[in-house]
Amino acid sequence: MNKIKTAVIAMILISFVVAIFLYPQMPDMMASHWNYTGQVNGYMSKFWGLFLMPILSLALFGIFLLIPKIDPLKENVAKFGKYFDGFILVMELFLFYLYLLTIFWNRGVEFNMTGLLTPALGILFYYIGILIENAKPNWFIGIRTPWTLSSENVWTKTHRLGGKLYKAAGVISLFGIFAGDYGIFFVLIPIVFVSIYLTVYSYMEYKKETNGKK
């Protein structure tokens, strides 16, 4: 097991230890959801407030470990394995960061949740861009439209462009730090635009490819 996977396991174990240690000290109902302005608008019991994120992180890690083993194109997954491992680390760090923010808030430390999440999301999206531009054709990771899955050439073009666009979206997200209550829109709008654009782009590239073969 490489160092990244070892670090992720350690992080998940720390999450469970934190949950067990803090359980007697936390309120019966914990803040668990915030609106786009950073105000609390959802609660859950302290058991789920403390243990949901560690359980989710563990389950997600298990899925990440399983993907390279069950993908019919596992040889291709191995070709960008180091980038996928990096994504696992970044994603698990993001979940751990979100978990710590939730803990601190429920311990009485108030702050703007959206403001602190915005840069973390920007970093996450930027690394997704790195992963995407290095991803080879497979069934689980990347921009998996009917057209990228039907043509390796369309896959390559879409992912080369997608990597640049996701990294750009990540950089734009960082500007949300300065946008106050509207910071979340610097995250959501670019990602929605990029996702829609790449879907249409892959279709158009596929149509050009198939029309050229007629």
Image (cartoon, helix red, strand yellow):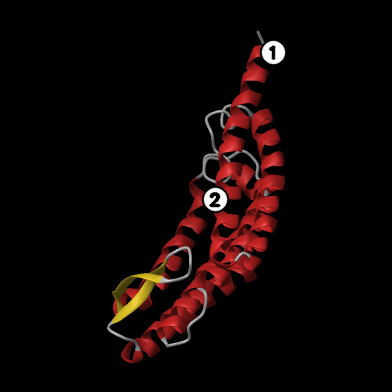
Neighbourhood count class around disc 1 (C-alpha, 10 Å): few under 14, some 14–19, many 20 upward: few
Q: Amino acid at mark 2?
A: Pro
Depth order, front residue of 180/100: 180
Whether the residues at callouts 2 and 1 have beta carbons within 8 Å, the answer is no
Would you name the residue on which mark 1 appears?
A: 212
Q: Pinpoint residue 68: horizontal percent, then vertical percent.
A: 54, 50
Q: Secondary structure at mark 2?
A: helix
Q: Does 199 appear above or below 187?
A: above
Residue at 48%, 47% (x, y): give it: 70
Marks 2/1: CA–CA distance:
34 Å
- The residue lying at 63 percent from left, 53 percent from top is 128
Q: Which mark is residue 83?
A: none
User: Is residue 49 left or right of 85 when viewed as pictured?
Assistant: left
Residue 105 in the image: state x and y as whole percent.
Answer: 45, 81
Residue 51 vertical placement versus 188 (above, below): below
In the orientation shown, which residue stands out farthest toward the top? 214
Residue at the image position 30 percent from the left and 73 percent from the top: 44
Quadrant of image for the N terminus: bottom right
The residue depicted at 55 percent of the width and 61 percent of the height is 182
Whether 15 is drawn above or below 169: the answer is below
Residue 37 location, x and y as percent? 48, 66
How many circles with numbers are drawn on the protein? 2
Where is mark 2, residue-wise? 68
Query: Residue type at mark 1?
Result: Gly
Q: Quadrant of the C terminus?
A: top right
